[in-house]
Amino acid sequence: MKNNLLGAVEARLGRYRSETYPGRVHDQHICDAEEPGFPSDIGLCQDTGFQGYPPAGVHIYQPKKKPKGKELTPEEKAENTLISSMRILIAHIIAGVKRCRIVKDVFRNTKLYFADQVMEIACGLHNFRTTLRYNTLE
């Protein structure tokens, strides 16, 4: 089972979850089918799996690849470091959702839409834990 998850870096919350797709489906094909809406003038850090997927009105930040036989400039290296520091926060959001083992283990239930409900509950639990953690620190 596979979902796409969009997260808010500043709040460390999952903001959008795609429908659940069975088997091996490419991330970009899920985005093409779902067409998630983005607010205008936001920054979107995406990995190279979404190359060629530019949503309208969004600033896209992707890491630069090193050209063959050449090196990246110091500015490009600094930009890659900044992008990777934001992407690690998204990886922490995904890990927080996968804390519920039912999401990361083999899902054997065959009831219709049950996988979507499980993923939605796992995302909600992550957001609940995160909200409680950061609201009690303030």
Image (cartoon, grey):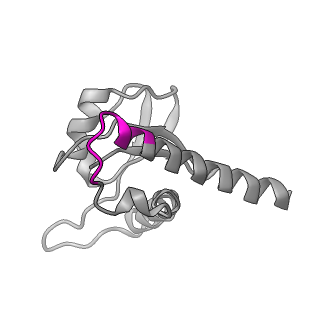
- Magenta span covers which residues? 108-117
**In the displayed structure, does residue 114 sit left or right of residue 97?**
left
Q: Nearer the viewer, residue 57 or 71?
A: 57
Residue 94 visible at all: yes
Q: Main secondary structure of the magenta part?
A: loop
Question: What is the residue that sits farthest to the left in this orientation?
Answer: 68
Asked where in the image residue 68 lies, by quadrant, the reply is bottom left
Residue 87 x, y percent position in the rendering: 46, 59
- Residue 35 position in % (x across, y down): 33, 26
Which residue is at 30% across, 59% downward? 64
What is the total number of numbered labels drawn onto the structure image?
Answer: 0
Could you say where residue 71 lies in the image, as x and y percent from the top left? 25, 73
In screen coordinates, is 47 left or right of 118?
A: left
Q: Residue at x 49, y 41 (%)?
A: 43
Horizontal side of residue 51 vs 135, given as left or right: left
Tell me if residue 126 comes above or below residue 84 in the rendering. Answer: above
Q: Quadrant of residue 21?
A: top left
User: Is residue 66 located in the magenta-colored stretch of the structure?
Assistant: no
Where residue 117 sits, quadrant-wise, is: top left
> Is 109 covered by the magenta stretch?
yes
Which residue does the image show at 26% across and 43% down from the upper left?
110
Residue at the image position 43 percent from the left and 32 percent from the top: 58
Quarter occupied by the C terminus: bottom right
In the rendered image of this protein, does residue 55 appear above or below residue 119?
A: above
**Residue closest to the eye, 17 or 65:** 17
Q: Can residue 44 be seen by looking at this rendering?
A: no
The answer to whether 99 appears left or right of 137 in the picture is left
